[in-house]
Image: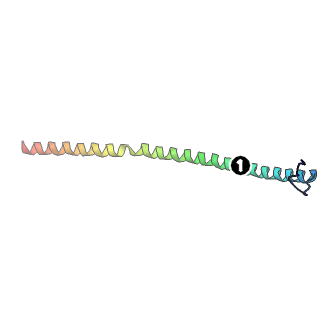
Amino acid sequence: MTQLDPLGPIVIGAREIYDQLLATDRKVDGIRGEVAQVAQAHGELTKDQADHEARIRALERGRWPLPSLAAAIALASLVLTLITFMSKGG
């Protein structure tokens, strides 16, 4: 039994293979450059995220005294009101 040529009458020479290899190499180089750009952009986004996180944390730290201060003022006014009421009533 004879073995059939899978390409049939098509003949591919070393030059065509070499040209395809060079074209593939250029495409891989292009992809490598794009991957480097994506990696750089990712690094910048990571820095931005860390900066935003730090800013949010600073804002959160700055806000916690406000409710405590409001509660202390309310308590002080209650005490003053009770003292005033007791001094008038007694």
> Is residue 38 found left or right of 66 in the rendered image?
right
On the picture, is 47 further left or further right than 12?
left
Q: Nearer the viewer, residue 65 or 88?
A: 65
Q: How far from the left and from the top, in percent, is residue 67?
A: 33, 45
The single residue placed furthest to the front in the displayed view is: 1
Rendered residue at 30%/46% (across/down): 70
Residue at point 43%, 42% (across, down): 61
Q: Position of residue 41 (x, y in %)?
A: 65, 50
Q: Which residue occupies 20% across, 44% down?
A: 78
For image coordinates 79% across by 53% down, the residue present is 27
Q: Residue furthest left?
A: 90
> Helix, strand or loop at disc 1?
helix
Circle 1: residue type: Val
Residue 60 coordinates in the image, percent (x, y): 43, 45
How is the structure coloured here?
A: rainbow
Image position of 19 with respect to 73: above or below:
below
Total count of labels = 1
Of residue 77 and residue 64, the one placed in the foreground of this image is: 64
Q: Write down the residue under mark 1.
A: 35
Q: Residues within 10 Å of mark 1 (few under 14, many from 20)?
A: few
In this view, the residue in front, 37 or 5, is 5
Outermost residue toward the bottom? 9
In the rendered view of the protein, which quadrant contains the C terminus?
top left
Counting from the top left corner in percent of width and height, residue 72 is at 28, 42
Left or right placement of residue 61 versus residue 54 in this view: left
